[in-house]
């Protein structure tokens, strides 16, 4: 097995896939703890489905780069979701559900009516459950992902105390003049950018796993916000790396392999928590 791994890692595209996968996992887990504690983790599903709809529109329009349309639309949707979550008439979970179903329906309809692809079902399946494009990355893609990951980490470190305050007591944060509204807006925009990148790794239907599973697993083992965040990052990076390596060796779908590793680690953490007397 070690010789096989050494052979695979001698190819640049495998190294690029591993680096990008680990960076995406790290960025997702940093935001995941706050989103889970704020009970807004389902935003991952909503934004990834919107990104699928935007990707379908970009495919139909035959744009030179999908990101020209997908990223702005997803970020704008994140802002709208945040605003709607503060609306008494339309709660955040209802808005996310509406956007999720609507974006999937519109995107699939556009692909069926206007797409010229001879393998429409295959294209849709890879977009929903993880595309093979993770193995066709260029050095420019890796540097772009590295740049985004550095920005996410810096954002989290600079605003750590404010994120902590907004996560546990948003009313206090607003009263203390910590700019809770602007910070929530920034978190939503950064989450949207990370989700768009993560779609290439696990697909639009599985992308919320990168946000939810590391945070929930760490919460089963630790209590403090800082410790949970660090543990979630380590768990996410290790699980993503293991899932990618297993996918390469066993020729299994990348997204499904990574999520299955997350599930196994979460179950193991639940078992350890029970042995330690935590429910």
Image (tube, helix red, strand yellow):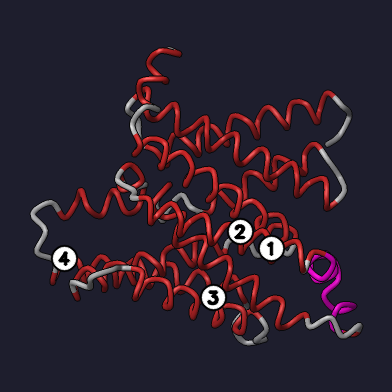
Q: Position of residue 123 (x, y in %)?
A: 22, 53
| Residue displayed at 60% across by 54% down | 27
Compute the Cα span from label 4 to label 2. 38 Å
Q: Position of residue 17 (x, y in %)?
A: 41, 41
Whether pointer 2 and pointer 1 mark residues with C-beta atoms closer than 8 Å, the reply is yes
**Which comes sooner in the sequence, label 3 or label 4?**
3
Q: Which mark is residue 154?
A: 1
Q: Is residue 200 above or below residue 179?
A: above
Q: Position of residue 149 (x, y in %)?
A: 57, 57
Compute the Cα span from label 3 to label 1. 20 Å
Q: Which residue is mark 4?
A: 112
Residue mark closest to the camera, 3 vs 1: 1
In the image, is 268 to the left or to the right of 162?
A: left
Q: Which mark is residue 150?
A: 2
Provide the residue span drawn in magenta: 161-174
Q: Which residue is mark 3?
A: 78
| Residue displayed at 53% across by 51% down | 24
Q: Secondary structure at mark 1?
A: helix
| Residue displayed at 33% across by 50% down | 138
In the image, is 111 to the left or to the right of 228?
A: left
Front residue of this view, candidates 12 and 253: 12
Q: Secondary structure at mark 4?
A: helix
Q: Position of residue 215 (x, y in %)?
A: 69, 48
Q: How many marks?
A: 4
Asked if residue 60 is among those painted magenta in the image, a careful observer would answer: no
Whether pointer 4 and pointer 2 mark residues with C-beta atoms closer than 8 Å, the reply is no
Q: Quadrant of the N terminus?
A: top left
Residue mark closest to the camera, 4 vs 1: 1
């Amino acid at each position: 097995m070690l010789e096989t791994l050494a052979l695979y890692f001698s190819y640049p595209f495998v190294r690029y896939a591993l680096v990008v996968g680990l960076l995406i996992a790290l960025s997702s887990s940093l935001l995941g703890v706050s989103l889970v504690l704020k009970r807004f983790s389902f935003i991952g599903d909503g934004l990834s489905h919107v990104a699928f709809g935007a990707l379908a529109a970009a495919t139909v329009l035959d744009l030179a780069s999908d990101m020209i349309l997908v990223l702005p639309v997803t970020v704008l949707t994140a802002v709208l979701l945040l605003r709607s979550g503060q609306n008494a008439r339309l709660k955040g979970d209802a808005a996310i559900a509406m956007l999720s179903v609507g974006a999937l329906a519109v995107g699939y309809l556009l692909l069926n009516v206007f797409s010229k692809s001879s393998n429409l079902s295959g294209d849709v399946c890879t977009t929903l459950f993880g595309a093979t494009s993770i193995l066709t990355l260029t050095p420019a893609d890796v540097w772009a992902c590295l740049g985004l990951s550095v920005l996410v980490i810096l954002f989290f470190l600079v605003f750590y105390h404010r994120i902590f305050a907004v996560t546990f007591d948003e009313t206090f944060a607003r009263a203390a003049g910590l700019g809770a509204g602007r910070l929530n807006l920034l978190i939503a925009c950064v989450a949207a950018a990370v989700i768009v990148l993560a779609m290439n790794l696990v697909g639009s239907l599985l992308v919320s796993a990168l946000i939810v599973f590391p945070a929930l697993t760490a919460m089963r083992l630790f209590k403090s916000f800082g410790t949970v965040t660090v543990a979630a990052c380590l768990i996410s990076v290790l699980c993503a790396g293991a899932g990618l390596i297993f996918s390469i060796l066993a020729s299994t779908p990348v997204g499904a392999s990574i999520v299955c590793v997350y599930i196994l680690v979460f179950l193991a953490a639940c078992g350890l928590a029970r042995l330690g007397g935590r429910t």
